[in-house]
Image (spheres, helix red, strand yellow):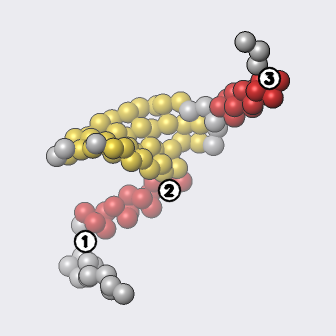
């Protein structure tokens, strides 16, 4: 079976991209809440460290937070964990 020359160029291109963004997994933790599982993966690539959070419950959803945003993410989460009494008012429905 002959592979067209254009196909080989595409393959080299994909390998090149994969090499630049190679991820290294530093640690993984799992959290189970009710019927859901959450995976916290601390990873690193050439652009720095990031936290990948995946929710598994029938489907899979993932968010990625670069290390530069961890403090802001934590602070936002804390507003839901320890809210002020008047902090949660119904959203306006238009």
Instruction: For marks 2 and 1, give the CA distance.
Output: 21 Å
The residue identified by callout 1 is 83
Instruction: For marks 3 and 1, give the CA distance.
Output: 61 Å
Left/right placement of residue 62 relative to residue 7 reads left
Toward which corner of the image does residue 4 lie, by quadrant?
top right
In the rendered image of this protein, does residue 1 appear above or below residue 43?
A: above
Front residue of 25/6: it is: 6
The residue identified by callout 2 is 69
Query: Secondary structure beneath disc 3?
Result: loop
Query: Secondary structure beneath disc 1?
Result: loop
Residue found at x 37% / y 64%: 76
Left/right placement of residue 90 relative to residue 67 reads left
Left/right placement of residue 79 relative to residue 53 reads left
Tell me whether circle 2 and circle 1 mark residues in contact (CB < 8 Å). Answer: no
**Tag of residue 53:** none
Residue 27 x, y percent position in the rendering? 41, 32
Tell me whether circle 2 and circle 3 mark residues in contact (CB < 8 Å). Answer: no
Is there any visible trace of residue 16 in the rendered image?
Answer: no
Toward which corner of the image does residue 78 lie, by quadrant?
bottom left
Query: Secondary structure beneath disc 2?
Result: helix
Instruction: For marks 2 and 3, give the CA distance.
Output: 45 Å
Are there few (<14), some (14-19), or many (20+) residues within 10 Å of tag 3?
few
Residue 68 x, y percent position in the rendering? 54, 54
Residue found at x 56% / y 33%: 23
In the image, which is nearer the foreground, mark 2 or mark 3?
Answer: 3
First of labels 2, 1 by sequence position: 2
Toward which corner of the image does residue 35 lie, by quadrant?
top left
In the rendered image of this protein, does residue 11 appear above or below residue 62?
A: above
First of labels 3, 1 by sequence position: 3
First of labels 2, 3 by sequence position: 3
Residue found at x 32% / y 85%: 93
The residue identified by callout 3 is 4
């Amino acid at each position: 079976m002959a592979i067209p020359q254009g196909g080989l160029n595409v393959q080299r291109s994909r390998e090149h991209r994969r090499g630049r963004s190679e991820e290294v997994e530093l640690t993984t933790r799992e959290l189970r809440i009710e019927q859901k599982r959450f995976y916290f993966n601390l990873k690193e690539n050439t652009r720095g460290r990031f936290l990948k959070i995946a929710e598994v419950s029938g489907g899979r959803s993932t968010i990625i937070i670069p290390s530069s945003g961890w403090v802001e993410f934590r602070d936002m989460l804390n507003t839901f964990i320890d809210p002020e009494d008047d902090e949660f008012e119904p959203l306006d429905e238009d």
